[in-house]
Image (cartoon, rainbow, N blue to C red):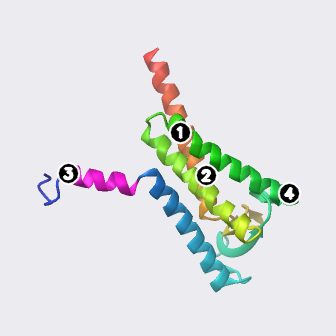
Amino acid sequence: MNADSSVPNSSRNTAAAYLMSPANIIMLVFIADQISKLAILRLLGHNVQTIIPGFFRIVLVQNKGAAWGIFSNYPELLTAIAFIALIVIIASFKKICAGKRVNEIALSLLAGGITGNLFDRIIRGSVVDFLDFYVGDNRWPAFNIADSAITISVMLFLLNSFLDDRKNAKSA
């Protein structure tokens, strides 16, 4: 037991492991993504809300394409690709993770993000984007929580790969 708590460390570790389980991470990303999109659709509409002038706004963009709106003329193809990607992730989850917790988290974030945007494509016909960062006339394409989870997952995979390469180089 920890001196500052009446809860045994093993119980806390078990609870933390449960809360951070792949299924819960996926659900958390999906739920946060969908709640934020519903709030934007219901409360903001087509209005723009400036949060930090000259840097950050909340907008409503209904994106039929992928990142930067590419392939917007092929929404069915993007839906199929997302669905196939999700199936591949689920089918190869254990193999890709290879027992590494960081890979579990990264893959769970990726699956949660794909699920959030796939849900939009199927239910709404487009992905709801609303986070708009810019400096002057230079704008980053609007994005959402699902996109953020996907980006974080890629960054985690890249960082982990870089660290593994460094560790392997030192041991060689």
Look at mark 3 in the image and give the residue it sits on.
9
Disc 2 to disc 1, how far (Cα)?
A: 12 Å
Where disc 2 sits, the SS reads: helix
Disc 2 to disc 3, how far (Cα)?
A: 33 Å
Please report whichever mark, 1 or 4, sits nearer to the chain's N-terminal start: 4
Q: Are marks 1 and 4 in contact (CB under 8 Å)?
A: no
Where disc 4 sits, the SS reads: loop
User: Where are the magenta residues, as a range?
Assistant: 10-20
Identify the residue at image location x=80%, y=64%: 64
Please report whichever mark, 3 or 4, sits nearer to the chain's N-terminal start: 3
Look at mark 2 in the image and give the residue it sits on.
151
Looking at the image, is 40 positioned above or below residue 118?
below
Image depth: mark 2 or mark 3 in front: 3
Where disc 1 sits, the SS reads: helix
Q: In the image, residue 105 lies at what x, y percent?
A: 48, 48
Look at mark 1 in the image and give the residue it sits on.
159
Check residue 110 for magenta coloring: no
Q: Amino acid at mark 4?
A: Tyr
Q: State the count of labels.
A: 4
- With 8 as the anchor, is 16 left or right in this view? right
- The image quadrant of residue 161 is top right
Give whichever of 159, 97 is nearer the camera: 97
Q: Amino acid at mark 3?
A: Asn
Look at mark 4 in the image and give the residue it sits on.
74
- The image quadrant of residue 72 is bottom right
Give whichever of 171, 92 is nearer the camera: 92
- Taking the image as drawn, is residue 51 in sight? no
